Image: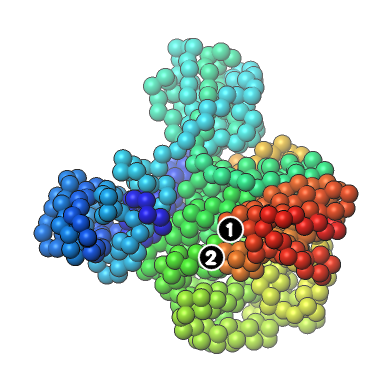
Amino acid sequence: MTKQAVWLWYPGDFEIHQGMLQNFQREERGMGWPAYWYIDDCHRNVNFKRSYTLTTPTSFTVYAQGTGYVDVNGTKYRLNQPIACAAGDVTIQVFVGNTTALPAIYIEGDVIQSDQGWLASNFVTSLPAGHDQLFTDKHQNPNVIVYHKLPITAKTVKALNDGILFDFGRAVNGSVVLNFNCNHPITLCYGESETEAKDVEMCYYKQDGVTATTTVRKRAFRYIFVPDSQVGDVEITAMHEYLPKDNIAVFQSNNKLINQIWNVSTETLNLCSDLFFIDGIKRDRWIWAGDAYQANFMNQYSFFNEDLDKRTLLALRGQNDIKQHIDTIVDYSMLWVIGVLNHYQMTGDKEFLEIIYPKLESMVQYFIAQTNELGFIYGRENDWIFVDWSEIDKEGTVAAEQLLLLETYKTILACGRVLDKTVDTYQAKYDQLLTNVMKYFWDDGKGAFIDSYESGRRHVTRHANIFAILFDVVDADKQQLILNNVLLNDEITQLTTPYFKFFEQDALCKLGQQQRVYQVLLDYWGGMLDRGAVTFWEEFDPKQHGKEMYAMYGDRYGKSLCHAWGASPIYLLGRHFLGLRPTKPGYETFEVTPHLAAFDDLHAVMPVKGGTVTFDKKDGRLSLTASRDGGNVIVAGQRQVLPAGETVVVDA
């Protein structure tokens, strides 16, 4: 936190309150659809406190969101009025309550101001006050997110089916401005696809009886169809709403399709990440922990927006008391824990780790209370064992969940050691679980992990086996067995969601299968582009065509066509083809292990904490320039230092 004055609140409360509001944004066919899990809100009354030793007299003014007062050495003062302080020791407390919104304060003064050093208490626990760089002005209200607006005119407007079809050429997340040249009300039919927009009866978003004075809410769309109208009756301008983010990442190669995949992935992630990482801009608009876990890996190789990930982690977890799993999904709660460690490795933000560690540990304890005598985690009543939209044998305890629990224990061990916590009991839990996972779920005959040993079916899917590779659960010999018997075995049910394609391609690259993954990028993500995608989808089955491409969840337009987990080519290209990764938290040290045989020419810029790495490949040679120290490049097993500002040339 800087010395600049900012709005302050109880840590996590801004994110929790805004997260609650975000999870109430879903709309379906004119109905509001709030998220169906328990949702926390912010504290209603907060005490802020700080002590100073003043060498000269000074004054300050406290502004607040809510009602309250200021206490200076036991004397009470009003909000919004200058308060004079004599030289000497002074202890200031600000009490603020807000029954409907986030209690927050802003203190203006030459010496005493709302910067680093303030504690916030919920009257049970005192912690360093929370803040966000979005709110640095006393005239702002941290309960109100002010979005930037970009007017977008339709690329084409045409008469169709006794109506008008507007194609804006891109995915829009916003409202519309209407200019009427007719005297009759109109109907707005929205669609991520043209097929959806033209379906007047069943399009996901539709608004009837629209006139020049009608309030039109924020929605996501590419197309708008106006039935029973003629071209010229109404003009529509889309007002896309967004929070600006810097994106210094660049990926340009001789393969135009890969370049397009990169650009569409970036657009998809950008649209699904304003205040939080959300799943998609049309349907849910909710904060799902599995989607968010992957989104930050992509963020790490594009926007490198630390605040966005922090907000999402805090919003997902809510207050410390746990009433159910995050999003009701057992595996998503575990991915949330694992995501905390990834955030620390990306940012080196120990202050954030200290604040969130108690919530991390209580979550792990919640898992432990849900394990049996073998150490296996199981689903309780009303828990959702999701894993993926796939045919997984979920009878009894499920292998994929146990692999995630292993990584969860590794996470709290790593985070606890950073903070000098006592974590020996978690090591014992890890050791017991690993032993029993191998005993009950590894099948020597199949050379793979089975989904469930309790069902007796010995069914093998990709999911647990992928996690075993990603989380280093098995040795090199078993990794090769999994590669041959599962990942390269067409008889094992294929994945159709980009969600688990992310994990699968990550595992394949880890096993040196970059060329195979390169082809998957061209075929799978390129396949969506062949079908006209301007953003990547929630699910894609290359065998589907026509209207069936858009159906999901029993709804003909239930599939999200702009879904955060569809943007994984950003991560795959950055991590496994350019080969960049941190080797110490916050990129104190990092390495580049390039795998660029698929590219003849390439120019890329990748973010690291506090800098960038630039890649230029031509004529079989790769030039690398890092803007900060700590880097190494590894080619053919040989390690070479990347000094800041110096260009290193290697074979590629």
Pointer 2 local density, CA inside 10 Å: few below 14, some 14–19, many at least 20: some
Question: What amino acid is found at the position of numbered circle 1 in the picture?
Answer: Lys
Q: Position of residue 438 (x, y in %)?
A: 68, 83
Instruction: Mark 1: give few (<14), some (14-19) or many (20+) Cα within 10 Å.
Output: some
Query: Would you name the residue on which mark 1 appears?
Result: 609
Q: Which residue is mark 2?
A: 348
Which of 14 and 516 lies nearest the eye of the viewer?
14
**Is disc 2 in contact with disc 1, using a CB cutoff of under 8 Å?**
yes
User: Is residue 537 visible in the rendered structure shown here?
Assistant: no
Residue 192 drawn above or below residue 633: above
State the image coordinates of residue 101 (x, y, percent, origin top left): 30, 49
User: Which residue lies at the image location 22% right of the left edge and 60% below the top edge?
Assistant: 55
The quadrant in which the N terminus is found is bottom left
For marks 2 and 1 on the same chain, the one whose residue lies earlier in the sequence: 2
Give the answer, above or below, for where 319 lies relative to 496: below
Is 18 on the left-hand or right-hand side of 394? left
**Which mark is drawn over residue 115?**
none
Cα separation, mark 2 vs mark 1, equals 9 Å
Q: Point out the image quarter for the C terminus.
A: bottom right
In the visual, does 526 lie left or right of 437?
right
